[in-house]
Image: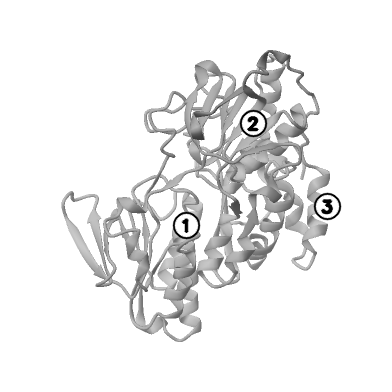
Amino acid sequence: MGSIGVMSCGIHAQQCANILKSGVHRGSCRSLHMTGRYAAKEYYDVVVVGGGAAGITMSSRMKRKVGAGNVAVIEPSEKHYYQPMWTLVGGGAKKLASSERSTSSLIPSGVKWIKSEVKGFDPDKNSIRIDDDKEISYKYLIIALGIKLQYEKVKGLPEGFQYPKIGSNYSVKYVENTWKALQDFKKGNAIFTFPNTPVKCAGAPQKIMYLSEAYLRKTGKRSDANIIFNTSLGVIFGVKKYADALLDIIRERDIQVNFRHNLIEVRADKQEAVFENLDKPGETKVYQYEMLHVTPPMGPPDVLVNSPVADAGGWVDVSKDTLQHKKYPNVFGIGDCTNLPTSKTAAAIAAQSAVLDKTISLVMKNENLTSKYDGYTSCPLVTGYSKVILAEFDYNQQPLETFPIDQGKERRSMYHMKADMMPFLYWNLLLKGYWGGPAPYRKLMHLGFK
């Protein structure tokens, strides 16, 4: 991905992809030949639970490693979405249809698609239970179940989305409501929320705020709008370099930020949102809104909670270095469902997939694990219809940047990468297992490439 920085935005995505593809990591073609003792049960060398970004990516990599017919993906949904696109859908810059593909079109040829939900894990017996109490056995298990949206934890939701003026870019059901609410805005408060839970793409609640502010300026309504960001956090962003840049934008655009404010109720019939002050338990404040964008509380999928593969919080309990389960050496986790202490993004999944591919290869060979995930994640912070601050950082909340430029500044080139290049990269390289994240410029500097 480092090559993108020296390309003009006019280069076609296919050309970029060809350059990227030439240097990507390809999995080993080593195959496992299992004996017939497993014939009595439905058995696969590798079972991948979840058919989202992480699950499809790892199924592609595992097919090359153990061969067609030896990998299964368990996923109930018929549709797959490129969810990072929904920020732009909610802001009217992209169509929802452009984020959608059929799951069947993405499952690698030769990989078995088991269209079912997982009902339980039994790692001591190397098996999982699916619908109709059917049992699937495995030699290696990859858990990639994503994260659960919990709108119901806010009183008045999700039924409140039946009313106008309220949307949420986190759900395919409600993302177009956001754009409708923005278009219909007349006068009053435009409120954007951030919940008191882990979330995927922690920058997204702000991105739609900046897009909305830009839209209201463009349409001559900005002077009649109060832009308010009510966040449960105590900071605007976890990495100081990018937080400083965002605070400058917030001041310049006259946006009101209320820290430690958590949405607890929506009275959609009255266009009221109720927030609790996390620093003063029991204290609440009611805001009237003309537009409300809700980022829902989130948590681990129900099947993981209290399961033998989860930690006390319900997240898949894996090594932050290797992504191998801490108790079961033939079980691995990737993406939003894990307890990895980094932001939950598609970019993080890309970097994790390369590390996990190497980890599994070494486990299969009974060799010591040497691959190490540094926590790399990325958040293209959309600050306008042609502006992005590209935040990239590691476990220590330190910038880990790809390009030899100051990524703390708004750039049109980074917007085009977010809006045009990254979707192509996602569909054509990441999901096919050919991209394991960028080679950050800072790392190249350490290796002597100047």
Judge whether 4 appears above or below 123 on screen: below
- Relative placement, left or right, of 355 versus 393 is right
Report the front residue among 191 and 241: 191
Report the front residue among 193 and 160: 160
Distance from Cα at disc 2 to Cα at disc 3: 24 Å
Point out residue 172 in the picture as x, y percentages from the top left corner.
50, 60
Q: Secondary structure at mark 3?
A: helix
Label number found at residue 367: none
Which residue lies under the disc numbered 1? 170
Is disc 3 surrounded by few (<14), some (14 to 19) or many (20+) residues within 10 Å? Answer: few
| Callout 3 amino acid | Asn
Point out residue 332 in the picture as x, y percentages from the top left corner.
57, 27
Sooner in the amino-acid sequence: mark 1 or mark 2: 1
* Residue shown at the point (57%, 39%) measured from the top left: 50
| Callout 2 amino acid | Leu
- Nearer to us: label 1 or label 3: 1
Which residue lies under the disc numbered 3? 18
| Callout 1 amino acid | Tyr
Task: Locate the C terminus by quadrant.
Answer: top right
Sooner in the amino-acid sequence: mark 2 or mark 3: 3
Point out residue 39 in the picture as x, y percentages from the top left corner.
68, 18
Judge whether 193 appears above or below 225 on screen: above
The image quarter containing residue 54 is: top right
Distance from Cα at disc 1 to Cα at disc 2: 27 Å
* Residue shown at the point (37%, 33%) measured from the top left: 313
Label number found at residue 356: 2
Q: Residue furthest left?
A: 282
Sooner in the amino-acid sequence: mark 1 or mark 3: 3
Point out residue 118 in the picture as x, y percentages from the top left corner.
50, 34
Is disc 1 surrounded by few (<14), some (14 to 19) or many (20+) residues within 10 Å? Answer: many
* Residue shown at the point (61%, 65%) measured from the top left: 97
